[in-house]
Image: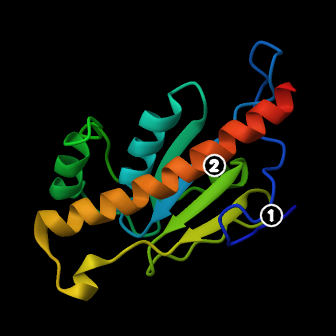
Amino acid sequence: MCRSPCAGASPIPPCRGDPDDGTSGPTPSVLFVCVKNAGKSQMAAGLMRAAAGDDAAEIHSAGTRPGTALNAMSVAVLREVGVDVGDEHPKATDLDLARRMTWVIVLGREARFDPGPGPIVETWDTDEPSDRGIEGVERMRLVRDDIAARVDDLTRRLDTSAAGRRG
């Protein structure tokens, strides 16, 4: 099974889970991981739920060293685009969960997570506007928009894979 670090470098393998109504294969699953599970991975999971729909994929987020609360600015910029993650909370990574996922997406330059055999692992080196002197809500909007574009691409790949399983 391919563990490509490159987006779109390989086809999506068969997904884990139970078939739904028999017209398609099992539901794909994604775990988004960052360090604190307070910002980027929460953003990605919320944006994926909005883009793919709750029934299209099993979506989780976690942190390698989870914080104590969500980043308030992350929550606010997601609400600007109609995504509400306010009821979420930081969670620790879980190897059993990660190994049963179709995809594990590691976000940012600081996070390191290897679930071992099973899922496809991608690392998204997300935009870091603070490297360019951009801070505050403007920074967070740029991070959100970068993650949203990547989530849209992943959602298209999941859709393509599901269509292939139906076809």
> Which quarter of the rendered picture does the N terminus lie within?
bottom right
Which residue, given by chain and number where applicable, does mark 2 sit on?
97
Q: Is residue 21 above or below residue 71?
A: above
Q: Percent position (x, y) of residue 146?
A: 39, 62
Q: Percent position (x, y) of residue 61?
A: 47, 51
Residue at position x 62%, y 44% in the image: 156
Q: Amino acid at mark 2?
A: Leu
Numbered tag placed on residue 101 in the rendering: none
The alpha-carbon separation of the residues under discs 2 and 1 comes to 12 Å
Q: Nearer the viewer, residue 80 or 96?
A: 80
> Which quarter of the rendered picture does the C terminus lie within?
top right
Secondary-structure class at tag 2? helix
Q: Is residue 159 left or right of residue 155?
A: right
Q: Is residue 77 left or right of residue 127?
A: left
Q: Nearer the viewer, residue 74 or 166?
A: 166
Q: Quadrant of residue 82?
A: top left
Secondary-structure class at tag 1? loop
Q: Percent position (x, y) of residue 105?
A: 57, 61
Q: Amino acid at mark 1?
A: Pro
Q: Is residue 13 above or below residue 145?
A: above
Pointer 2 local density, CA inside 10 Å: few below 14, some 14–19, many at least 20: few
Which residue, given by chain and number where applicable, does mark 1 sit on?
117
Q: Nearer the viewer, residue 75 or 87?
A: 75
Q: Is residue 121 left or right of residue 42?
A: right
Pointer 1 local density, CA inside 10 Å: few below 14, some 14–19, many at least 20: few
User: How many numbered marks appear?
Assistant: 2
Q: Is residue 147 above or below residue 165?
A: below
